Image: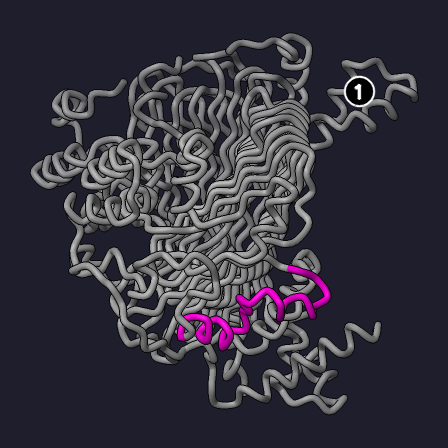
Amino acid sequence: MSEAKASIDKETVEQVAQFGGEHYKYGFTTEIDMDRVENGLSEDIIRFISAKKDEPQWLLDWRLDAYERWLTMDEPEWAHVDYPKIDYQDLCYYAAPKSMEDGPKSLDEVDPELLKTYEKLGIPLIEQEMLAGVRKVAVDAVFDSVSVGTTFRDELAKEGVIFCSFSEAVKEHPDLVQKYLGSVVPKSDNYFTALNSAVFSDGSFVYIPPGVRCPMELSTYFRINEANTGQFERTLVIADKGSYVSYLEGCTAPMRDENQLHAAVVELVALEDAEIKYSTVQNWYPGDVDGKGGIYNFVTKRGDCREDRARISWTQVETGSAVTWKYPSCILRGDGSSGEFYSIAISNNLQQVDSGTKMIHLGKNTSSKIISKGISAGRSSNCYRGQVSVHPKATNARNFTQCDSLLIGDKCAAHTVPYIEAKNLSAVLEHEATTSKISEDQLFFCQQRGLDAEEAVALIVNGFCRDVLQNLPMEFAVEAQKLVGISLEGSVG
Amino acid sequence: MLDAQSHFEQIRDTLPGDGQARAATLAAAEAVGLPTRRVESWHYTDLARLLKSGEATGVRTVDFAGVKALEAHFENGLLHGEPQAEGLSVAPFSNTIAHTEAPSPDTVMASYNHALAQNGLTAEVSGTLAQPLVIRTSGTQPVHLAHKISLAAGAKAVLVDDHMATGYANVVFDIHLGEGAELTLLRSQQAGHQVGLSRVTLEQDARYKSVAMISGGTLARHEAHVTLKAAQAHAELHSAVLGHGLSKAATHADFTYVIEHQAADTSSNTSAYNVLDGNARGVFQGKIIVRPDAQRVDAQMQTRAMMLSEGAEMDAKPELEIYADDVVCAHGSAIGELDRDALFFLRSRGLDEATARQLLVAAFLEQVTTHIDDEGLSEIMRQLVDTKINTLLGNLSGEVSS
C-alpha cells in the first residue's frame, strides 16, 4: 500500500470516529437578511424573477413558454422512489441575501456573514488564501437563488475563459447564452426541466475558447439556506474546439424538518476534439434517521458531444438528499466521440436514490463506459437506472457497463434497471451487474487486524468504490472518501 | 387485428361457464384496451401495431409426432384426443381459474384470455409420467386457451407446448408444482401471433425448467411469472430466438420474465440467446425480485444476442429488485455480431464462409438446447435449429429492408 493511500485510509477512519454523534456537519443555518418573494408560482413570479435580474425580453419569453408547457405536464412517477406529493404553490421561488441587492462589485464588498458561511463549509472565497494551496480552483458560490461571487475571474480571463454566474453571462455574453441555452436539455424535456426553465434563478456559466486548456479547475458550490425555498439553478458549460475543462460541483444545505426541492439543469456542450470532465459531490441534507426532512434532488444533467471526437465524462458521488432522481447523460452525436459515467451512490437511513445514466450513440465509432457502485444501508432504497441506446447509423458503437450493488443490513433495498437497445449490427454492448453484501470473511479479516466493525466497513466500501474514486480530481477524491465513511455512520453494529 | 367483442359474440354459445361473468371481464378488459409502448412491461412490444401490421405466417419445420408422447391437440380451439396415462388425470375444461384482479395495462391480456378462453388442458399429475405430454396447437382461427397443470408432491413430468397455429393465439398456462415436484416445459413456436403468459408457483424442493424456442411466426410474446414460495425451490428459464424475415414478415420475439424469490434458500437461473437476421427484433425483459428475508438466494440471468443483419434490433432490460442482503444476484448482457475471429479461425481450417457461419450460430443456440434432458426431444430441437439456420443463412443473410 502506498504511503498516500495509507494516510487517506487513516484519515477516513479518523473521520468516521470524529463524527461519532454528529452525522451532518453542514447542517447549520446562516442568519442573514433575506429578500424573498411570497410562496407560490405564477406568471407574475416569473416576471418578477426576470425583472429582478434585469433580463432581456427573449429570456422572459423563454421562461413563460416553459411555464406554459409545465402547466400541461405531469410529474413523472416511473422512478423507484416514493415521496408525498409536492405542493408547488407552497414553495418560494426566489430568495437572495439582501446585501446582494446593490450588486457588490467584488468579493471585498460581499457580506462577511456570507463569506463566513463558505469558510465554514471549507470553501475559501478569498483568493489569497487559495494561493497557499497546491492547486488553484476557481469557485462560483451560489447561495439560495443568487451567485455571491466568483474567484480568479481575471486570471481566467487572460486565457479567454469565461467563468461567471449565469445572470452575468446573460448580460455580458447574451449571444453565447442564447445560442446554447436549452440546446442540450430542451425546456420541455421533462416536468422538472420545464419547471427549472421557468423559474431558474442563477447558476454558473463556463465558456472555454478554442484550443485552450483551462488553467485551473472550475467549481461551483451550491448552498440552500432559506427555509421552504426551492433551488433551481442552471449550469451551462461550453467547451469550444480542442479545449479542455474540469468542472467540480458541491452542494450542502442546513438541517431542516421539512423537505426542500432542488431541481437543477446542467447542460454541457463539447465541440470538436473538446473534453469536459464534470465531477459532483452531492451532499445535500439527507434527512434524519427517521427520514424527516432532507432535500428532494430532481436534477437533469446532460452532455452533448456535438462534434467529432468530443469527450464528456461524468463522475458523481451521491451521498446526500432524501430523494434523488438524477441521470447525467451523454449524447454521442459526433463521430468518434466518447462518454463516461462513474458513480457512487450511497443511501442510508430512509434515503431513496434512483440514479443512473443514458448513453445515446448516434455517431459512428462512438464509445461509452458506465461504472456504477450503489451502496444501500439502513432502510434505504438504491436504484441504478440506465439506458444504452445504439441508433441505426451508429456503426461500431461500443459500450461497457458495470453496475454493482452492495447491501449493508437486511432492511435496505438495491435495484438495477438497465435498458439496452441495439439497432445496429456492429454494436458491441456489454453489461454486468452484481448484488452482494460485505462478506463475513472480509469483515473478520479487518476486525482481526484491530479495526472495529464500522472502520472495517468504511475500508471495505472504499475499496468497493475505488474504480470511481480514482476518477475524481485529487481534492475531491479525498473529500469523497471521507464522505463515504460518514454517510454509512450507524449502519453496522 | 382481432376484434375481441365481435369474436366473443360469435363464439359465445360455445363457451363453457358463466357467460355474464365473461361479458363483464371482457368489458373491463376492453375499457383498458391493448397495451401500448407507454406501458412499462410492453415498452418494446407495441402489441396493437404488431397485431395490425404483422403477417401471421409460419412454416412447419419439424413436429413432435415422431416422439412417443401423450398428446392433447387443440385445432382451432377444439380438443382432439384426450391423453391417458397412469399418474395423469384430465378434467374437462371449465374456465374456473380464479381471476379476481381488475385489469391494468400490465395484466389486461390475461383478462382477455379469461373472458374468451374456449378451451384448455386441465391436468393433474400425481406420479411420474413415462412419456412427455404434448399440447399441440394448430389452426387458423383466433384462439384463447387456458391450461391448468398441477403436479402433486413428488410428481414428475415433461410437457411440450407445440405451437403451430397461424392465427392469433392468447395462451395462459397456470402451473403449480407441489413439494419436490419436477416439471420440464419445452415450448416451440413456429408460427402465428402468440401472446402467452405462464404463471408458475413452486413449493419446497420443487424444480421447474422451461426451454423455449421461437423459430417462426411474426409475434411471440412469452411472459412468465415464476414464484418460488419455499426453500430449495429452483427455477430455470432458457430461451432461444431464431428471428428472421423482412419488414412485416419479420419475427418479433419478446421474453418477459418476473422471477420472484419469496422464500430463503431458493435459486433461479435464466438465459436468453437471440439470433437476429433480416428485420427481426428480439426483446428480453427479465426481473429478479428477492423479497425481504429471502436470504441466501442465488439468482443468475444472462442475455446474449447475435445480430446477423443491418436491419435487426435487440432490446434487453435485465432487472434486479433486491430487498434482502445475503444474496448472490447477477445479470449479464452482451450484444454483438458474429465473432469475426471465430469466423476467421474456422475458415482457416478450410470451411467455407456459409458453413462457418452456420456452425457458429448453431453452437450459439446449442447453449439453450443443451438444457433439454430428454434425448428424443433434444434431437428434434437440434434438427429444428439446423434446418432453420440452413434456410436462413442460405437465403436471407445480408438482405436489408428498412
Q: Taking A298 as reference, is B182 left or right?
A: right
Amino acid under disc 1: Ala
Residue situated in front as seen by the camera: A139 or B231: A139
Whether the magenta-drawn stretch holds residue A389 is answered as: no
Does the rendering let one see residue B267?
no
- Colouring style: one colour
Give the labeled residue for mark 1. B356
Find numbered disc 1 in the image and state the secondary structure of the residue it sits on.
Answer: helix
Instruction: Name the quadrant of the N terminus of chain A.
Output: bottom right
Which region is colored magenta? A113-136
Q: Is residue B304 above or below residue B326?
A: above
Q: Is residue B347 above or below residue A417?
A: above
Residue at position x 61%, y 9% in the image: B399
Does the rendering let one see residue B99?
yes
Could you say where residue B108 lies in the image, as x and y percent from the top left?
25, 39
Whether the magenta-drawn stretch holds residue A115 is answered as: yes
Instruction: Name the quadrant of the C terminus of chain A.
Output: bottom right
- The picture quadrant where one finds residue B78 is top left
Residue at position x 65%, y 20% in the image: B308
